[in-house]
Image: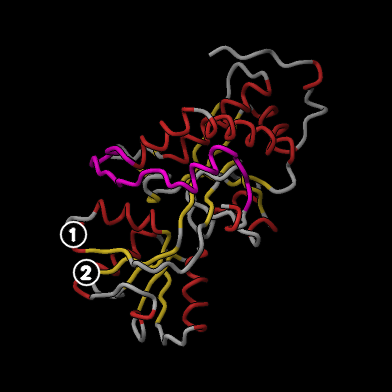
Amino acid sequence: MTFALASPSLSAEELTGTLKKVKDTGVITLGFRDASVPFSYLDGDQKPVGYALEICYRIVDAVKERLGLAKLDVRLNGVTSATRIPLIANGTIDLECGSTTNTFERRNQVSFTNTDFLTATRYVSKKSTGLHTIDDLQGKTVVSTSGTINLRQINEANIARNLGLTILPAVDHAEAFLMVQNGRAVAFVMDDVLLASLVAAARDPAAFEISSEALSKPEPYAVMLRKDDAPFKAVADAATAKLYAGPEGQVLYDKWFTKPIPPRGINLGLPMSAALRKAFASPTDSFDPSAY
């Protein structure tokens, strides 16, 4: 790929924030998750892959072009639900390429580029337990991943509905789902798409079901970046808007949500929703569920 040379107006002295950092070092660092299928996870060779990572690589290409760099090294840094925001804020990573919900509260600490997925909070349980709604969880033990919006939501529902739940935090999604499989918890509360990926990869997918009732309205996922870095955000916004609004957006979505994915060839079977199709046609970084 050929990139235009930097114009005189792009001198290092005029650059600020992440763009200056990248220009000075020749390196951009991406944060990835190891088990957020299909957004960001490790394949059979322990290589980070996924839908969100591909979006981040598009942003990297745009940064490289914006800065007129002949070469830009990409470093990958693993993150968890608990570490992703601190590592963005302290400059360890420049983009967080995972399954992070864009919320008003988080925007006090970080920024987000355009929405790349819409999800809702539900729970997965064994079919044999006969659980379908939130009230069905009355008096039971449930789990959610530490540092997530979902953990907060089930705590809020527990109080509001007087459910009498025992709520356990898990280190990551894999541990939480294992707790349902081995009976330590009857349900794992999480974004429905992540639950679908865990079920699809299970030894016996038919043994599990995802709740019919949601604990939330549509929630937007987006790539996370540092707060108050308008020039870098402008590059990310332009790159993602071009991707989503063009034909490549649908192609990229289908690759990860409606076709077999590595390493086991599972298929999530999740066609693009009408709400996300609308968001792709008119890209937005809004955190407000009513915008979708």
Does the segment drawn in magenta span residue 28? no
Q: Position of residue 211 (x, y in %)?
A: 34, 67
Which residue matches tag 2?
127
Q: Which one is in front, 151 or 252?
A: 252
Q: Position of residue 30 (x, y in %)?
A: 53, 39
Q: Secondary structure at mark 2?
A: helix
Can residue 181 be seen in the rendering of this structure?
A: yes
Image point 59% across, 58% down: which residue?
A: 290
Task: Identify the main secondary structure in magenta.
Answer: loop
Check disc 1 and give the amino acid type.
Answer: Ala
Number of residues whose C-alpha sits closer than 10 Å to that of mark 2, classed few (under 14), some (14–19) or many (20 or more):
few
Image point 69% across, 27% down: which residue?
A: 23
Q: Which one is in front, 42 or 219?
A: 219
Check disc 2 and give the amino acid type.
Answer: Lys
Assess whether mark 2 and mark 1 are in contact (beta carbons under 8 angstroms): yes
Query: Quick check: 9 above or below 105?
Result: above
Which residue matches tag 1?
206
Image point 40% across, 65% down: which residue?
A: 122
Image point 60% across, 31% down: which residue?
A: 239
Q: Which residues are magenta?
A: 258-286
Q: Is residue 203 toward the left or the right of residue 268 in the image?
A: left
Query: Quick check: 170 above or below 258?
Result: below
Res 27 quadrant in image: top right
Q: Position of residue 123 (x, y in %)?
A: 36, 67
Res 164 quadrant in image: bottom left
